[in-house]
Image (cartoon, coloured by chain):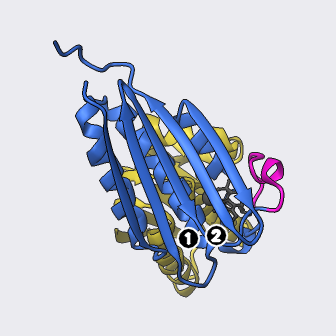
Amino acid sequence: MQLHFNVKDENLIVRFTGELDHHTAQEIRNKIDNKYKNDMLKNIILDLKGINFMDSSGIGLIMGRYKTTRANDGSLVLINVNSRMEKILTMSGILKIVKVYRNEDEALHNI
Amino acid sequence: MLDNSMKLEFPSKSQNESFARVVVASFAAQLDPTIEELADVKTAVSEAVTNSIIHGYENSLGIVYIECEIKNNKLEIIIEDKGKGIENVNEAMEPLYTSKPELERSGMGFTVMETFMDHLEVYSEEGRGTKIKMVKEFKSVSIKE
Ligand SMILES: Nc1ncnc2c1ncn2[C@@H]1O[C@H](COP(=O)(O)OP(=O)(O)O)[C@@H](O)[C@H]1O
Ligand SMILES: [Mg+2]
């Protein structure tokens, strides 16, 4: 799993390439949290486009970052969610609290 | 379609989560699954194996056992650990129930297995381990003469 960070104003945009499971989630979580804290950012945009596998560990990762941003008066949003991920995310009810936008522009505009 | 079977065992290291789901998916490939069906199997296997590693064996190292059997257009998968077992299986299977929220677990593992597979059975005994039996029926199997 590879992570790519991009900062726009107070927004942290996170892109992934690879598989999101329990094994990779541990490292991803630490890297995102460190970047978010060190750069004193407010919002997180998770771009799920490059993820080619996700199990319920992904729900935990998203939920965790949702809490981190909320505790800092920010928000967490998702972009490029495919139908497969939507199925898993809907099951957990997380999409009732986490907003999904089509792409980065739409997310930056609404966040 | 000829019946077939395989067995796999490996130490409870998290690197093996992806190894296990890829092996089972490769085995299932002989049933000509759709991409969606294959993703269902991969996800369910990932959930069960992860559970054995993080809940069954917790911080110790043990062996995870997988057995697969193909009968007609059905794939039966058994995933077993000799770890700590589950005190209350019904409670464990409730959506959103997790005993490890501090590890950012979502409590959705069993729900995912139930949703993506056609059949799920959980046998567990405290102090002895847990055995998951799942069945996936491949609806689109091509008819071979
Ligand atoms: N193999 C196992 N050994 C021991 N306990 C287990 C096992 N699998 C599941 N459990 C228990 O069932 C609960 C629910 O599992 P699951 O639905 O996968 O959620 P999660 O893994 O996110 O906690 C776990 O939190 C754990 O307490
Ligand atoms: Mg689980």
- Residue A25 location (% of width, % of height): 50, 69
Q: Nearer the viewer, residue B135 or A15?
A: B135
Residue B4 in sight from this viewpoint? yes
Residue occupying image coordinates x 52% and y 50%: A78
For badge 1, the amino acid type reads: Ile
**What amino acid type is highlighted by mark number 2?**
Gly
**Which chain's colour is yellow?**
A
- Which residues make up the magenta segment? B87-98
Residue B91: within the magenta? yes
Q: Give the secondary structure at mark 1.
A: helix
Q: Which chain is blue?
A: B
Q: Residue at x 66, y 73 (%)?
A: B103
Q: Position of residue B90 (x, y in %)?
A: 81, 47
Residue B56, which numbered label? 2
Note whether ligand 1 is within 8 Å of mark 2: yes
On residue B53, the disc is 1
B61 and B93: which is toward the camera: B61
| Residue A17 in view | no
The quarter of the rendered structure image containing the N terminus of chain A is bottom left
Q: Where residue A90 is drawn, which disc sits there?
A: none
Left-right relation of B70 to A90 = left
Which quadrant of the picture is home to ligand 1? Answer: bottom right
Under 8 Å from ligand 1: the CB of mark 1? Answer: no
Tell me the CA gap for discs 2 and 1.
6 Å
